[in-house]
Amino acid sequence: MIRVLLVDDQALIRGGFRALLEAEDDIEVVAEASNGEQALALALEHLPDVALVDVQMPVMDGIEATRRIAADERLSGVHVVILTNFGLDEYVFNALRAGAGGFLVKDTEPADLLQGVRVAARGDALLSPAITRRLIGEYVARRPEPEPAGLDVLTNREREVAALVARGLSNDEIAAHMVISPMTAKTHVSRAMTKLRARDRAQLVVFAYESGLVVPRAGR
């Protein structure tokens, strides 16, 4: 059973999400919060698998709530998914940097929302590596220079793997590209994430773009 925490300051939106999620046999809404402060307390109380978190809320916004959840070792199993009205925006990028595993637009199709929750619960980048890659690529493309980052902690193989993750490849696709086994590809990805202290693949994608390891393609 996938346990979900809903975080949004609008009760109507929370109610709609709850009705949709609880109609599924494998998903349970364990709590609701109207601001980030409540979200943090309820996350500690219920230890959900997924927290669906709005960005703009009173008391504590979704980005700060995400940052605190990601920083708390007790909540290492909580995968934050940011809810946004606008799609590709700076708020979502900052939330990914803070530790979110991905994002959903609030008017997404019900089937996509349900699939997104299941993907997030597995710890994969949401909704797919390509969507997160496009978000980060479009945002970073507007910045004059990539920010320096600790590329020196990665081996050449790990750098190659991180770049392929940022381009949207799955572990199986990375394995085929590098002519290695899927298990070896997974190991390289895991080691790169550990060295960079990335909670998930989404943060590895953020690193790849911020460091200049991957350069956004023009016109994307």
Image: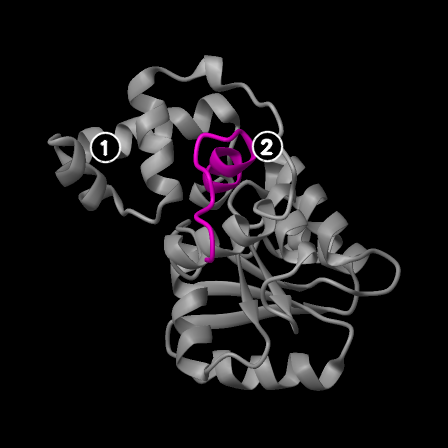
First-in-chain label (2 vs 1): 2
Q: In the rendering, at what x and y percent does residue 125 appear?
A: 43, 52
How much space separates mark 2 and mark 1, taking CA atoms?
26 Å
- Secondary structure at badge 2 equals loop
Bin the neighbour count of mark 2 within 10 Å (Cα to Cα): few under 14, some 14-19, many 20 and up: some
Residue under pointer 2: 146
Residue 152 visible in the snapshot: yes
Front residue of 144 and 207: 144
Q: In the rendering, at what x and y percent does residue 55 appear?
A: 72, 62
Give the residue drawn at x 44%, y 85%. Answer: 23
Q: Is residue 84 magenta?
A: no
Spot the residue most to the front: 218
Of the residues shown, which amino acid type is indicated by label 1? Ala
Q: Which label belongs to residue 19?
A: none
Give the residue drawn at x 34%, y 23%. Answer: 158
Segment colored magenta: 204-220
- Tell me: residue 100, above or below residue 106: above
Tell whether 167 sits left or right of 39.
Answer: left
Q: In the rendering, at what x and y percent does residue 201 appear?
A: 43, 42
- Secondary structure at badge 1 equals helix
Give the residue drawn at x 59%, y 63%. Answer: 88
Tell whether 142 sits left or right of 197.
Answer: right
Residue under pointer 1: 185
Bin the neighbour count of mark 1 within 10 Å (Cα to Cα): few under 14, some 14-19, many 20 and up: many
